[in-house]
Amino acid sequence: MGGLLGFVGLWLLAMAYAAWRFAVRREARAPLPVSLPRVSILIAARNEEGALPRCLASLRQLDYPAELLEILVGDDASTDRTAAVAQAAMQGFAGRFRVVSITENRGLARGKANVLAHLARLATTDFFFITDADIGLPRRWIAALLAPAVPGVGTVTGITAVRGPQLFHHLQGIDWLLSLSMVQVVSDQGRPVTAMGNNMLVTRAAYEATGGYEALPFSVTEDFALFQAVLAAGFDFRQVFNAEVRADSLPVPTWAALLRQRRRWLRGVEGLPFRLRLELLFFSGFWPALAGVAWLAGAGPALGIWGAKVVVQGVLAYFAHRWAGLRLRWWLLPLFELYTLALTVCILGFRLVGGPVVWKGRRYD
């Protein structure tokens, strides 16, 4: 019993520390270069005729000279009108725009990594901005990610918020910002965790030092694989957490799709350093520990601990939303607890049962 209480107490202290770090953090804004560089925006798209126009519209509204933008969309064997709607959405664009039909694999790359491998070889600038077709970007996205990309830095990663009108969408939004806030706390200590493949900058020098996606072992978490390879090549990283780099993602529509997404992410977790995997295991152990407290000490102490968790986690969620330029819906926090409990149980089941990853209509065993 003492061990369980010690575990949940340590868990609450860790969350309180993360909330404190967010409450007092200061993020220095690096100045932009005097001469603005040309940049390339790379988008992998597979059957995205519904989502892609929103993404491209946000790119047309960027607060960055259009003549310095090169936007490359890779059409990954779509069976819908992805290419046609992309061309229509970018008519009259003052910068360089191209839709590239991807029909062959390049080296070891598959899926999204293969599309990006092709686009990176076609890009003509020294900065690759990578995002997804279901993302809406803020106006200062280019400038805000470009500023920290000082010499020696290979990747700069922004944050992603899930936004939608339904309750399920709101819960996903809290989940994402809480998770990214924990990543930020660790990254602020100089410890690399991961990069976000829907909101990241990679310099050409760093990308080419890895050999590109075609030279990397295939991974269903291609952004994490590239991030690790860039670090291994001797480059530094930056994680930026503010509203200027907040990409807004469309929510996952169903519970089944959410579980498929998390199954894919689990493959990336397996590649984390041992210490970080232990820390993730620690944070995922709250619910089993709470169940043990309820079994041994009764519902009263367990409810008290659960209430403390809601409060401490809620404070972290508040500051994460505030830095992201969003408002936290406090009334969702108790429902978010049920969401995370169900997600933890399902992910554990996935981990025990195993099986292939299904991503963009393709199976990866």
Image: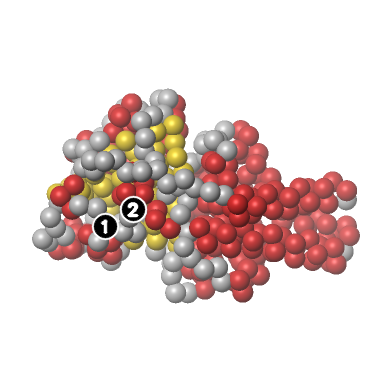
Q: Which amino acid is tagged 2?
A: Trp
Residue 242 vertical position relative to residue 306 in the rendered view, above or below: above
Question: Residue at point 65% right, 41% down?
Answer: 279
Residue 139 vertical position relative to residue 124 in the rendered view, above or below: below
Q: Which amino acid is tagged 1?
A: Leu
Position of 217 with respect to 180 (left or right) is left
Q: Are marks 1 and 2 in contact (CB under 8 Å)?
A: yes
Residue 279 vertical position relative to residue 172 in the rendered view, above or below: above
Residue 108, position as x, y percentages in the image: 32, 32
Return the residue at label 1: 62
Q: Nearer the viewer, residue 126 or 294?
A: 126
Residue 34, position as x, y percentages in the image: 26, 41
Q: CA distance from mark 1 to mark 2?
A: 7 Å
Return the residue at label 2: 141
Figure quadrant of the C terminus: top left
Q: Quadrant of residue 146?
A: top left
Question: Residue at point 50% right, 58% down?
Answer: 323
Residue 328 seen in the figure: yes
Question: Residue at point 28% right, 33% down?
Answer: 204
Question: Residue at point 21% right, 42% down?
Answer: 38
Mark 1 crowdedness (10 Å alpha carbons): few <14, some 14-19, many ≥20 = some
Q: Nearer the viewer, residue 152 or 216?
A: 152
Residue 75 seen in the figure: no
- Dot 1 or dot 2: first in sequence order is 1
Residue 233, position as x, y percentages in the image: 40, 25
